[in-house]
Amino acid sequence: MIDDLHFHDTRHLAITRLAQKIDVLDLARMTGHRDLKKLMVYYNPTAEDIAKKL
């Protein structure tokens, strides 16, 4: 058992990994986020990740 592990932690990890594969707007639709500011809490790409997409 992992102490201090919550559903929110797994959601954050899943959304971060999905963000590496799909567009942010598609990610928002998939996760049900209407406000992109709230989605940005989960979407944490590095500069290197963004550069790879270019």
Image (cartoon, rainbow, N blue to C red):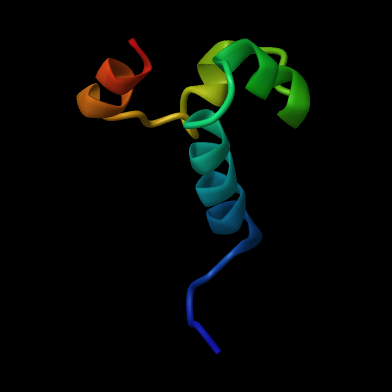
Q: What residue appears at the point 22 percent right and 27 percent down from the top-left corner?
A: 48
**Image vertical order of residue 18 relative to residue 50, above or below:** below
Q: Is residue 48 visible?
A: yes
Q: Is residue 27 left or right of residue 53?
A: right
**Image vertical order of residue 27 relative to residue 9, above or below:** above
Quadrant for the N terminus, please.
bottom right
Residue 3 in the image: state x and y as whole percent: 48, 82
Residue 12 in the image: state x and y as whole percent: 53, 46
Question: Quarter-wise, where is residue 51 in the image?
Answer: top left
Residue 39 in the image: state x and y as whole percent: 56, 24
Q: What residue appears at the point 37 percent right and 17 percent down from the top-left corner?
A: 53
**Image vertical order of residue 16 relative to residue 36, above or below:** below
Q: Is residue 34 left or right of residue 13?
A: right
Residue 15 in the image: state x and y as whole percent: 57, 39
Q: What residue appears at the point 51 percent right and 42 percent down from the top-left corner?
A: 17
Q: Is residue 48 left or right of residue 20?
A: left
Q: Is residue 32 visible?
A: no
Q: Is residue 46 left or right of residue 25?
A: left
**Image vertical order of residue 17 relative to residue 5, above or below:** above
Q: For this rendering, which residue is in front, 50 or 28?
A: 50
